[in-house]
Image (tube, helix red, strand yellow):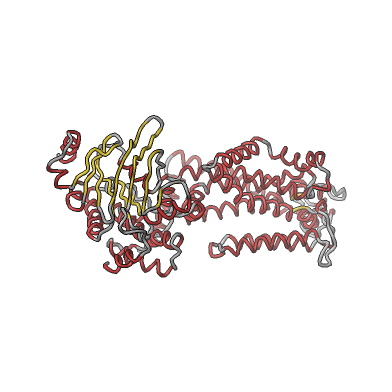
Amino acid sequence: MTSDTAQASALPHPDFASPAIVMRGVGKNYGNFQALRGVDLEVARGERIVICGPSGSGKSTLIRCINHLEQHDAGQIIVNDMEVGSELKQLQAIRAQVGMVFQSFNLFPHLSILENCILGPTWVRKLPRAEAEAKAMALLERVKIPDQANKRPGQLSGGQQQRVAIARALCMEPSVMLFDEPTSALDPEMVKEVLDVMLELASDGMTMLVVTHEMGFARQAADRVIFMDQGQILESAPPEQFFANPEHERTRTFLSQILH
Amino acid sequence: MSASAISSSARGAGLWRSLFGSRLNFALTVIFALLLAAILPIIVQWSIIDAAFFPAIPQTCETAAGACWSFIIAKHSQILFGIYPYDERWRPLIVCLLLLGLLIHSVRPTAWRPSLAAWWLVALTACWVLLGGGMFGLVEVTSDKWGGLPVTLILTVVAIGFGFPSGVLLALARRSDLPVIRLLATMFIEITRALPLLSILFIASIMLPLLVPEAFLPDKFWRALIALVLFASAYMAEVVRGGLQALPRGQYEAADALGLSYWQSRRLIILPQAVALVIPALTNTVIVMIKNTSLVLVVGLFDLISSGKAALADPEWRSPAVEVYLFITAIYFVLCFGFSRFADSLERRSKGSVR
């Protein structure tokens, strides 16, 4: 595992002193609905950020703009010193450096677990197959499902699938990982196995943006918790402060609703 | 008891139940058994017992009360190869064997390598040279003398072999983000689908020469071929588009998020799943296209059916039309049913891979 991180940091990443992600005045509209209104956010390298907020507050849209799954219509997003936009080559370079884990796993059902994991490395990173497979097996080991490598995604439980999805993203040796409600589609007994993998990843120093309502994860792993409402960042604070002493009334209401 | 023994005895019990399980099933079984008992002897009597086989001359049929298979035996080469010059009929024979052999070879998953496409191109070129001649010391035979099974096979293979990939490209184009490409694809598909195949064939073979001097046009066979490819591609495009739209958006997003390019994502992620989803509908289109090739007879090409009809014109025989059409039907049935089985195996292969 330490060798993985060593390998990852050996990658020619841009400037380590610059922030991993910079967002300036980012806006996004769906017709008349303003999903994001002028969001400013700076994510330092190795920073772990949990984003929460009521449904429709723009938190998923925010992280989906970072790898351009949604196109922002105002402002500027810079990832690893590259601006996110429609320029294809640059966009693919950014996406190769930004891993994403979806709520509904989105594994490729026609490919085996191993093939899911080596697809990006072999086709995007042009790694030799043997090397990609070794790397994938090491990561499947790390998410504790090496024995399922030759099964199809449909044969795995939800929790296992999500762990594979995390391994698939990590196979690309990303410098940033985005998690879009990674545990929301899981049966309750499977949430922990996925969170455990994410906690381990956080302790290894991965830059993470996690949209989730798992406040336990936020307390344990986050450097900063962001509360979004109506397309804006309302509050941004370290977890101790965020949970003990939220500034805004709306944050308090939201927390009381989800913390029971 | 072994698992297979259990399942076979369970199947036996299931068969018994479905035949005699209820009063309705019992009644239906009895009625159909009686019908079969009434019809089967007549068919056997006509097609085998009273049928005329050898010697394959008109007199054999005149004395026989049943089917005149002598005609098929005597005329099989004319039915299969049309008016192709008699002494050169080994050429269409090789073409048929080549195409059928390659078709059978292509069915096996182990054969699916990029080289297979190259083999098909080589085989089709070889067919072209063999049928047309005029080179390598072969006597030239113009395409208006080609006929029968090789014509049907070439038209089918080319219409589907080229129509499917173009259909896939058209389907992708119709869902493209680029408005011009989307508009062109939509226009092509809608116009082609709105015209009957007959009228497209007429335009290609009769109207086109009125507008453009014949010298600048490929010959009639090519024009019909192109018309069939275009027609097939428009239909297949819509079938494939259905598959593209049925695929969850998450699959597109996951492919994008990995940094795959557009074509990598289509080839590795989207199309394998989208096409697998629409295999039944594609099979339907393919089978319709196999039979559509017979429409080329209206523009003066001799496919299997028209060469069968031509063979019937021999006044020495008493025109055993039923037997000839049964023969042709059997060939079409083998082609269509064979494809349907192939599609079935494809579908079973992809089961479990599509949610």
Residue sitting farthest toward the left: A244
Q: Is A222 left, or right, of B342 in this rendering?
A: left
Q: Nearer the viewer, residue B39 or B277?
A: B277
Residue A168 percent location from the top left of the image: 36, 58
Residue A252 percent location from the top left of the image: 16, 36
Q: Is A184 left, or right, of B267 in this rendering?
A: left
Q: Is B30 left, or right, of A98 in this rendering?
A: right
Q: Is residue B106 visible?
A: yes
Q: Is residue B11 visible?
A: no
Q: Is residue A71 above or below residue B151?
A: above
Number of marks present in the image shown? 0
For residue B299, which quarter of the picture? top right
Residue A59 percent location from the top left of the image: 30, 41
Q: Nearer the viewer, residue A85 or A103?
A: A85
Q: Is residue B115 above or below residue A28?
A: below
What residue is rendered at 60% in x and 50% in y?
B164
